Image (tube, grey):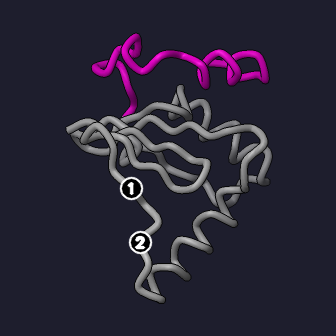
Amino acid sequence: MNIDKNTLEVLSKQPYEEIDKAALVDIEHVKIDSTLPPGQRLLDYFRQIKNPYCFRCGTTTVRIGFTADGNSLDSILKNYFIGLKRGCFFVKMCYDHLVVIGDWRIYATY
């Protein structure tokens, strides 16, 4: 699969209910070749994962989404781990399968 900006846009907006879960790639089988330059590494990852917004991790289906004008994932994770260290808990569970960390939404079905 050739992934360009338009394809990424379509994949990011694909409704979770319409995704063929059986066709998803298990991220545990994706191998990152650290000898490749960063751009080639990213293209190779896209080629292997097919849909960077929805994949499997073992038997768990993972759907990732975020708001375009929200905080970066680095910033959100940094604040999350600082909060954990301080005893705060920023992650909330909704609908038994949606994890929300700031502006990021990670869906997981078991």
Quick one: SS at disc 1?
A: strand
Magenta highlight on residue 12: yes
- The image quadrant that residue 68 belongs to is top right
Residue under the image location 41 percent in, 85 percent down: 87
Residue under the image location 47 percent in, 49 percent down: 100
Q: Residue 89, which numbered label?
A: 2
What are the residue bounds of the magenta stretch? 1-25
- Amino acid identity at mark 1: Lys
- Amino acid identity at mark 2: Phe
Quadrant containing the N terminus in the rendered view: top right
Q: Residue furthest top?
A: 18
Q: Residue 92, which numbered label?
A: 1
Magenta highlight on residue 39: no
Look at the picture and state if 37 lies above or below 7: below
> In the image, residue 110 lies at what x, y percent?
20, 38
Q: Residue 23, which numbered label?
A: none
Quick one: SS at disc 2?
A: loop
> In the image, residue 22 lies at what x, y percent?
28, 20
The front one of 70 and 53 is: 70
Does residue 26 appear to the left or right of 83 in the view shown? left
